[in-house]
Image (cartoon, rainbow, N blue to C red):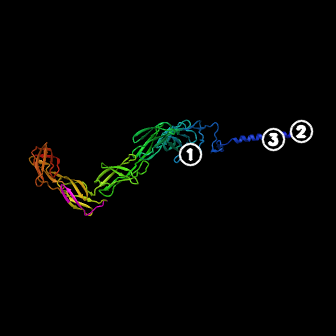
């Protein structure tokens, strides 16, 4: 009896165990299924959560899927599901994401290396969320519009061949009038350096080259252009090439060329002089002189070094002080000069302008005879300040005149010279200045008094001074007809005349005066009408 009871007890325990195992098994199966509102955590090998997303759509086995590759997104199937990746929003772009339930454009920001073949893609839907197949859409980037046609899955794409930089791509769905913006970033495949260096020091130019996938271009021949000259260099194992810079001081543009995709990238190269001098403007024999600081190629002043200078064709040797400064006194006559300094440490030559101003200021002048104009000369001290009550001597046409400056430092000499060209030289203390004076002849005016005359009468003209309108007396006037000249002198009223014996008709006549001591030549053309 006891044995039977034990057996029954065992059977109950065994049956309970089977029921419990079945329940646990059913519970485990239920736990592995999920609905569309479950959050799925994706863990890596160390159970560290690397991404976590919520899915609002259930993807069944009969629905299409989206696959990603390195260059573009491609889709298969009919209805397009919501993408399974988050798309970031840049400063100017607005991505279509799974949360944009009403969007009819699905697109993402992209980044690509210059001309690596990456295309920008977008999926276009109708208002019901169905793919727009074989429909025209528009992409707008960099101010240019491109019309593309979607494939059977509603996808359209466009190649990106823009220069490195940041752009905004606009995708326009013509069926729904929706526009979505995305950021497109084109990354350069050349990483160059801008260079600022002293003349002939050890600083040089480097650039690193990569291919369209970001891999270093090792042991490749690359090309550089600077100052109009092309150079080729070979990259090292890191894709870096070096170009030594031995240019004269100045600013240059250095362009590097990637042999894989022909990208050109420009850099600034600034070569600084090791001779720091300035242009000098000074008054004759004042205390202003020329100085320059001379450095070695590392920027250290050259102390107690002999430096050579050349000005006006004469060489001078001077020694730098404790600051590397060399000085040269300027006692040159007024005028413009070039001074050149030679750096003994690296052979650099650098030039500056020297402008020596006269303490006497006068200008060339051109006047008409008897115009009553004055020649002026101004006296200044070594700082350019006008000096009053100074005695100035003026030599013109071999005659010396003495004049005193007024309160403005100006001396005046009236010009009463005959027509001609003159040199006028003014003197004050150790300064002098020479200028040109041109006195022009007077200008005459010819007026026709009798444009119509009877045969046998006189054709008359009047000659006057153009400026004063006074008659010009005893002036030979020429009348030219048919290549033959006839002459007549003007009377006290400035009238000259000739008798006309031509037949009735109209004739072309030239009337003029030849250049004389006082007057310039002049000619007038007119029509003479002869009547019966």
Q: Secondary structure at mark 2?
A: helix
Which x, y percent locates residue 81? Answer: 60, 40
Mark 1 closeness class: few <14, some 14–19, many ≥20 residues within 10 Å: some
Q: Which residues are magenta?
A: 383-401
**Quadrant in which the N terminus appears:** top right
Of all residues, the one furthest to the left in this rendering is 456
Query: Image height check: is 415 above or below 147?
Result: below
Q: Secondary structure at mark 3?
A: helix
Residue 170 seen: no
Relative side of 77 to 522, left or right: right
* Location of mark 1 (residue): 88
Q: CA distance from mark 1 to mark 3?
A: 55 Å
Q: CA distance from mark 3 to mark 2?
A: 20 Å
Residue at the (85%, 41%) spot, across then down: 9
In front of the other: 513 or 146: 513
Relative side of 105 to 270, left or right: right
Q: Of the residues under marks 1 and 3, which one precedes in the sequence?
A: 3
391 part of magenta stretch? yes
Residue at the (82%, 39%) spot, across then down: 14
In front of the other: 264 or 158: 264
Which x, y percent locates residue 494? Answer: 12, 53
- Which dot marks residue 3? 2
Which x, y percent locates residue 187? Answer: 50, 42
């Amino acid at each position: 009896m006891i044995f039977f009871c034990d057996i029954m007890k065992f059977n109950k325990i065994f049956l309970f165990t089977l029921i419990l195992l079945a329940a646990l098994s059913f519970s485990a199966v239920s736990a592995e299924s999920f609905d569309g509102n479950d959050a799925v955590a994706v863990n890596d090998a160390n159970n560290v959560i690397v991404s976590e997303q919520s899915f609002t759509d259930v993807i069944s086995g009969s629905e299409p899927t989206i696959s990603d590759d390195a260059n573009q997104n491609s889709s298969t199937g009919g209805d397009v599901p919501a993408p399974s990746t988050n798309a970031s929003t840049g400063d100017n772009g607005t991505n279509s994401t799974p949360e944009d339930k009403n969007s009819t454009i699905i697109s993402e920001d992209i980044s690509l290396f210059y001309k690596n073949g990456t295309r920008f893609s977008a999926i276009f839907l109708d208002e019901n969320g169905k793919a727009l197949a074989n429909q025209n859409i528009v992409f707008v980037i960099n101010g240019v519009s491109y019309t593309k046609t979607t494939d059977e899955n509603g996808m359209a794409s466009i190649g990106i061949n823009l220069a490195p930089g940041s752009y905004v791509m606009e995708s326009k769905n013509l069926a729904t009038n929706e526009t979505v913006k995305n950021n497109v970033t084109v990354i350069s495949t050349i990483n160059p350096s801008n260079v600022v260096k002293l003349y002939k020091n050890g600083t040089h130019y480097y650039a690193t080259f990569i291919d369209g996938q970001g891999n270093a271009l090792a042991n490749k021949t690359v090309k550089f252009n600077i100052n109009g000259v092309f150079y080729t260099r070979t990259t090292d194992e890191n894709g870096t090439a070096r170009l030594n810079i031995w240019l004269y001081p100045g600013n240059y543009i250095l362009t590097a060329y990637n042999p894989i995709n022909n990208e050109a990238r420009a850099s600034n190269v600034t070569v600084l002089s090791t001779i720091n001098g300035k242009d000098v403007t000074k008054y004759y024999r004042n205390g202003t002189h020329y100085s320059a600081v001379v450095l070695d190629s590392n920027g250290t002043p050259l102390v107690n070094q002999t430096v050579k200078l050349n000005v006006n064709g004469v060489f001078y040797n001077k020694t730098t002080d404790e600051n590397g400064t060399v000085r040269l006194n300027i006692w040159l006559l007024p005028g413009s000069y070039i001074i050149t300094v030679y750096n003994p440490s690296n052979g650099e030559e650098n030039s500056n302008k020297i402008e020596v101003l006269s303490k006497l200021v006068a200008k060339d002048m051109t006047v008409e005879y008897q115009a009553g104009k004055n020649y002026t000369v101004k006296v200044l001290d070594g700082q350019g300040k006008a000096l009053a009550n100074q005695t100035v001597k003026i030599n013109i046409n071999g005659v010396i005149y003495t004049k005193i400056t007024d309160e403005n430092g100006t001396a005046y000499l009236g010009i009463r010279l005959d027509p001609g060209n003159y040199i006028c030289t003014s003197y004050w203390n150790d300064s002098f200045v020479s200028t040109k004076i041109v006195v022009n002849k007077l200008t005459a005016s010819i007026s026709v008094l009798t444009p119509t005359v009877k045969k046998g009468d006189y054709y008359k003209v009047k000659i006057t001074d153009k400026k004063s309108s006074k008659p010009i007396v005893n002036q030979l006037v020429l009348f030219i007809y048919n290549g033959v000249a006839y002459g007549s002198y003007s009377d006290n009223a400035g009238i000259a005349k000739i008798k006309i014996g031509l037949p009735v008709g109209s004739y072309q006549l030239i009337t003029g005066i030849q250049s004389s001591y006082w007057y310039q030549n002049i000619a007038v053309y007119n029509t003479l009408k002869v009547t019966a």
